[in-house]
Image (spheres, rainbow, N blue to C red):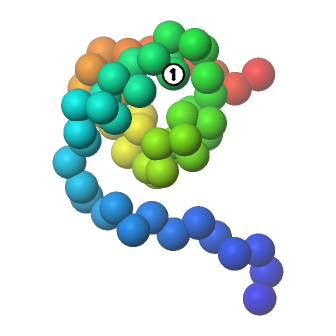
């Protein structure tokens, strides 16, 4: 077997106010989608979706 893939145990859990605040903070610091997702232990898809709901713009990786 190859590289172990990350497994998210938090499948479909609601975002807490603390997580939303942290998401806003990290987007403000111009962090990448991958960095934000890892930090929040959420999938990139989940972070992208929540950012869209909050009308936040995540910077593209350079």
Residue shown at 69% from the left, 75% from the top = 4
Res 49 quadrant in image: top left
Res 8 quadrant in image: bottom left
Residue shown at 30% from the left, 32% from the top = 18
Q: Position of residue 36 (x, y in %)?
A: 54, 34
Report the side of 31 relative to 45 (left or right). right
Q: Is residue 35 above or below residue 14?
A: above
| Residue on which the image places disc 1 | 26
Camera sees residue 28:
yes
Q: Position of residue 10 (x, y in %)?
A: 34, 62
Q: Helix, strand, or loop for circle 1?
A: helix
Q: Quadrant of the N terminus?
A: bottom right
Q: Position of residue 22 (x, y in %)?
A: 41, 27
Residue shown at 76% from the left, 22% from the top = 62
Mark 1 is surrounded, within 10 Å at the Cα level, by few (under 14), some (14 to 19) or many (20 or more) other residues, namely: some
What is the total number of numbered labels drawn onto the structure image?
1
């Amino acid at each position: 077997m190859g590289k172990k893939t990350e497994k998210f145990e938090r499948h479909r859990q609601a975002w807490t106010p603390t997580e939303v605040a942290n998401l806003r903070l990290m987007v403000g610091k111009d962090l990448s989608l991958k960095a934000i997702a890892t930090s929040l232990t959420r999938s990139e898809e989940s972070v992208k979706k929540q950012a869209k709901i909050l009308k936040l713009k995540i910077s593209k990786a350079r």
